Amino acid sequence: MNQNKIIELLEQATGLELDEETVKGLIDARLEKVLATVEAKQVALGPARPGPQVGLSRYLGDVRRLGMGQAPRHLEASELVSVAGPQLKALPAARAKDLREGATIAGGYLAPAEQAGEVLNLVNNYSAVKGLCREVPMQGHQITFPTISGGLTAYWVPEATDTETYGLGDGAEHGEKPRSEPTFGQLAVTAHVLAVKVVVSNQLLDDSDPGVDQVLRALFAETIGQAFDVACLRGAGTAIDPVTGLAGKITTNALSVSGDFSFDHLAGLIFAVYENAPHAAEVPVLGHPKAEKVLMALKDANGDYIYRQPGQPRAEQDARPRVWGEPFVRDPNILTNLGAGTNETRLFAGDFAGSAIVGLRHGLVVKTNPWAEPYFSYNQTAFLAEVRIGFNLSDEKRFAMLSAVPTA
């Protein structure tokens, strides 16, 4: 049954002359009237609710039933909160912040803080790059850091011998201190929206066990984490792919394997970073699992394997494997079909902790809307998960990329 047929039937039943906007207004007014009687005691969701947990899908089902004049199934009416009414002021500050957006009577309900925070933490499980970088909170669309692109020079100055010739010539030979000037620059980190949209039927929301929200939570984390990882590794920096990844940023230390792959190539990758970041605490190496398998077979000049599993010598205190003493980070989002034979991959290394910045404008928020069209007419609910996040390097010379690494 299409939308026009529904309106026609409503006109016959009510004797009113209706259109799409009038029908929406009637639904809005009815929902507002119902929710106006709700006493805002708490948001009874997830871990915040004593006893058995009530997932977001069942919560939304109860909200939708209230809007249609029906009794909720899983919660008492007094335990449901409208995000549009004055009752919002009675919520604790932390909850009010999570429920403040998208708040027309017909529309947006946010996932509870426990869901959003947990999903954001799960993102790190699927983004190898994000956990390595320095994370900076952002108050606006863009944040700018001052940088020094040219360093200073120190000079030895002899004891002054002739004050009458002060300022003549280079001055150093008479005891005058030479001037050294730094070169300043700027590093801008821009937050971009990364979003996932899923539409499910209301029957599935009502009947699913486990709840759809529990399934979507992990899917949102995996999808967004991998999408951000891909952007950091090989983003194009275009309108629809706004982050420029490491493959596009690294120019100074863009290395390539020549001849047979050996431990010397890996040493060259790591020390290309240390040459420009000599004080880095460590230089993590990122590689695909296929590259890791190849690295496990490499030996140094003494016949010792350069790859160390956690617990082995030179890796006793680390939960990550190490290659040449540096942490190896497994990243399945690195391409493995490069080269003429489509059997090559890349290795990345860098001072991530000191020179790679992830700007977080806001963490992952899950919004739902069972009343917006066309979803309402088709008895569906839309879930939208989005995060505003950015990525940039303060100095590309502190990173290196090794191409033409064999996958077998």
Image (cartoon, grey):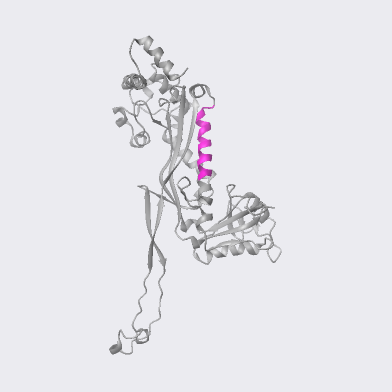
Does 21 sit left or right of 384 as displayed? left
Magenta span has 213? Answer: yes
- Residue at point 40%, 55% (across, down): 188
Q: Nearer the viewer, residue 265 or 280?
A: 265
Up-down relation of residue 315 to residue 31 (above or below): below
Q: Position of residue 365 (x, y in %)?
A: 43, 37
Q: Which residues are magenta?
A: 210-227
Residue 315 in view, yes or no: no
Dividing the picture into quadrants, the one containing residue 375 is top left
Residue 47 in view, yes or no: yes
Q: Position of residue 86 (x, y in %)?
A: 29, 28
- Residue at point 37%, 74% (across, down): 180
Q: Position of residue 405 (x, y in %)?
A: 64, 56
Does 266 sit left or right of 356 as displayed? right
Q: What secondary structure characterizes most of the magenta part?
A: helix
Up-down relation of residue 316 to residue 213 (above or below): below
Q: Nearer the viewer, residue 322 or 319?
A: 322
Dividing the picture into quadrants, the one containing residue 176 is bottom left
Up-down relation of residue 205 to residue 348 (above or below): above
Q: Position of residue 211 (x, y in %)?
A: 51, 27
Magenta span has 226? Answer: yes
Residue farthest to the right? 303
